[in-house]
Image (cartoon, coloured by chain):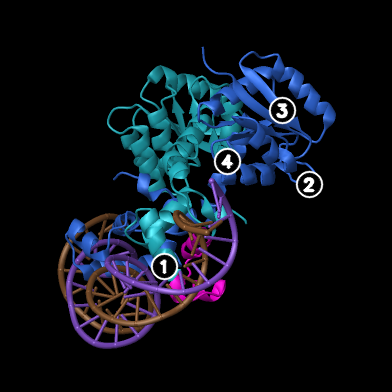
Chain colours: A blue, B cyan, C purple, D brown
DNA sequence: AGCAAAATCCTTATAAATGGTGATTGAACA
DNA sequence: TGTTCAATCACCATTTATAAGGATTTTGCT
């Protein structure tokens, strides 16, 4: 038999806190270690108990869920964070994903999904509600739209850019492609100009944003 | 009234091809321009008709859906691609997303979802089935796991890395942070060492993979 | 056949990044 | 109170990248 998952629940609404507690306590695999009405006292509670996952709301006075998740990732990297948010707020979702939370559920989630999320997170994977995934996808594909349609790189330019991104020097690229360094340099210059970049960093950023490394020609 | 969406359907199974045709023809917003039993003749058909979206299977003889989508993105960037795949094959999903297809549905999709996907794609956005989104998320979070847990960058190092990624030179970073170029250089060197990179490209790659630019401290 | 774009190569100069080594200060922590 | 680590600065040598010109050859397309 596997160990119970130790959970700390944080929410500033007493009523919701009690509700979620009751819901989770009815699940034998879980162990509600403690609860908190705001994020500020969480570090203290953590030092007193062994905790696997912190389940937290986002909108809270004093210290909100995002700040809390940051603090946790920073000070206690082993403790996972599951966000439980009322609204399907795209800005919040972005922030949370960027801050590397381990999961994000909406408060209307069913008991079954909640358990699944907790188990998944406990196993070291991420768990996001469908709505959250959709938001994440949209966000990912938003940025590249404009660039992608306007900028045309030639086959060779893409190739050179690929090797630049793979940390090859001009020298090494010229060897790899059996062309002179001068030629590689010309491609480099054209890339800088086409992609409107000041230096290598800009080129690599473009390559990453447009997933150039994945392409196999 | 808006223009009809011109669609070309590609599938090597005659029966499925007819089925999907019948299904789509019953929708007034759509206009089935033509069909094809393999990817090879698609370029020819494109030159003959005006086409907005190519709906294609993946597993096909001669030229498969992935090759086709590549060709389309390359030669006819305005034409969108919607993949219709039988299997929920994670490797295929990865490949397609990497190759920047505009949508990916499973063949068990309902008429309603099919229409929604086509409309969404026609509007310039992406559309993926839920299963596909899940796969994409998993993939995204898989890579960074190992690195993220082992490598610890200091506050200052992250800051310097951020500006490197933003195409600042050492000079400019030192001005921005009110420290000497020597110090910036030291951070640079430590970053190269910590992130096991040969040069700036490696640093930027790491920053991109770990979404360092998004963080707001 | 003829045009346009891509790919190739060249030189000269300057700016920037990388490698190596060493040293000081202050904060955090046990 | 001693130790670790982050942050700061310095010097020197070398390698790479960037800037700015011009030039020729291949290739794809009509």
Q: Where on the picture, by quarter, is residue A29?
A: top right
Q: CA distance from mark 4 to mark 1?
A: 28 Å
Considering only order in the chain, which callout, 4 or 3, is on the residue closer to the N terminus? 3
Q: Are marks 3 and 4 in contact (CB under 8 Å)?
A: no
Find the magenta span and give its range: B156-183
Mark 3 and mark 2, same subunit? yes
Q: Where on the picture, by quarter, is residue C9?
A: bottom left
The residue singled out by tag 3 in the image is A34
As helix, strand or loop, the secondary structure at mark 2 comes to: loop
Q: Chain of mark 2?
A: A
The residue singled out by tag 2 in the image is A62
Image point (41%, 59%), residue name: B191
As helix, strand or loop, the secondary structure at mark 1 comes to: helix
Considering only order in the chain, which callout, 4 or 2, is on the residue closer to the N terminus? 2
Find residue C26 and report its horizontal and vertical position in percent.
58, 67
The residue singled out by tag 4 in the image is A76
On the rendered structure, is A61 left or right of A117? right
Q: Is residue A187 visible?
A: yes
Considering only order in the chain, which callout, 2 or 3, is on the residue closer to the N terminus? 3
The residue singled out by tag 1 in the image is B186
Q: Nearer the viewer, residue B59 or A81?
A: A81
Find residue A34 and report its horizontal and vertical position in percent.
71, 28
Q: Chain of mark 4?
A: A
On the rendered structure, is A133 left or right of B132? right
* Marks 3, 2: nearer the viewer: 3
Label of residue A44 in the image: none
Find residue B44 and report its horizontal and vertical position in percent.
35, 41
Image point (41%, 57%), residue name: B203
Quadrant assignment for the C terminus of chain A: top left
Mark 2 and mark 4, same subunit? yes
Mark 1 and mark 3, same subunit? no
Q: Are marks 4 and 1 in contact (CB under 8 Å)?
A: no
């Amino acid at each position: 038999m596997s160990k119970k998952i130790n959970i700390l629940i944080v929410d500033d609404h007493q009523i919701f806190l009690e509700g979620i507690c009751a819901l989770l306590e009815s699940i034998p695999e879980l162990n509600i270690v403690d609860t908190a009405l705001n994020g500020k006292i969480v570090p203290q509670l953590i030092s007193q108990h062994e905790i696997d996952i912190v389940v937290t709301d986002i909108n809270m006075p004093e210290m909100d869920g995002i700040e809390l998740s940051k603090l946790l990732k920073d000070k206690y990297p082993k403790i996972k964070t599951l966000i439980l948010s009322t609204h399907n707020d795209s800005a919040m979702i972005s922030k949370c994903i960027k801050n590397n939370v381990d999961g994000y559920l909406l408060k209307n989630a069913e008991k079954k999904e909640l358990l699944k999320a907790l188990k998944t997170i406990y196993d070291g994977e991420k768990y996001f509600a469908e709505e959250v995934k959709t938001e994440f996808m949209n966000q990912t594909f938003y940025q590249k739209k404009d660039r992608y349609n306007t900028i045309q790189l030639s086959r060779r330019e893409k190739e050179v850019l690929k090797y630049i991104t793979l940390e090859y020097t001009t020298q090494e690229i010229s060897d790899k492609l059996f062309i002179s360094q001068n030629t590689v340099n010309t491609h480099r210059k054209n890339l800088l100009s086409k992609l409107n970049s000041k230096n290598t960093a800009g080129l690599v950023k473009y390559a990453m944003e447009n997933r150039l490394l994945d392409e196999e020609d």
